[in-house]
Amino acid sequence: MNLVWYNTLQKPPFTPPAEYFPIAWTILYILMGIAFIVILFKKRSFDKYIAVLVFIIQLILNIFWSYIFFNLKMINLALFDVMLLLVAVVVCTVYFFKLSKFAGALLIPYLLQVIFALYLNAGFAILN
């Protein structure tokens, strides 16, 4: 991650300190992993297939966001990515809830973080 470049950016209000992100994302990935394992143990169904597929898609979009934002330094493309990510996380959360209330609930903090990430990314796009 290129924190030197990141530290030069104008930051939107409510941008947390850099130390927030590794802690928050570690917790979120643990919750996501537990939710995914719960879904994997559900019986075979079309909803389970869609849930797993959308989970993988959102995970790919999540990984690409960091690369696009920090390595390529393409804030607007990262904004587009996080918009797609938000849609994927909403769909994933809905399908996880259909299969397991517990698994769906575990994704709520992640969904809220992605909404916050969209706000931050939009702020970076506007200010920089």
Image (cartoon, rainbow, N blue to C red):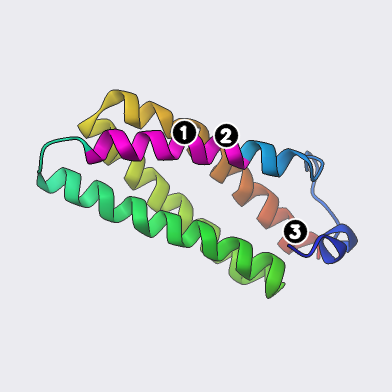
On screen, 41 above or below 49?
above
Q: Is residue 115 magenta?
A: no
Q: Which label was assigned to residue 124?
A: 3
CA separation in Å, label 2 and label 1: 6 Å
What amino acid is at disc 3? Phe
Q: Place residue 123 in its image quadrant.
A: bottom right
Q: Residue furthest top?
A: 102
Answer with left or right where residue 103 lies relative to residue 60: left
Q: Are marks 2 and 1 in contact (CB under 8 Å)?
A: yes
Residue under label 1? 31
Q: Which mark is residue 27?
A: 2
64 relative to 60 in the view: left or right: right
In this view, the mark in front (3 or 1): 1
| Residue at point 45%, 31% (across, down) | 108
For the stretch drawn in magenta, the main secondary structure is helix
Q: Quadrant of residue 4?
A: bottom right
Residue 35 part of the magenta segment: yes
Q: Give the magenta part as a residue range.
A: 25-40
- Disc 1 marks which amino acid? Leu
Question: Residue at position x 60%, y 71% from top?
Answer: 77
Of badges 3 and 2, the one in the foreground is 2
- For image coordinates 78% across by 40% down, the residue present is 16
- The answer to the question of whether label 3 and label 1 lie on touching residues, with beta carbons closer than 8 A, is no
Q: Earlier in the sequence, mark 3 or mark 2?
A: 2
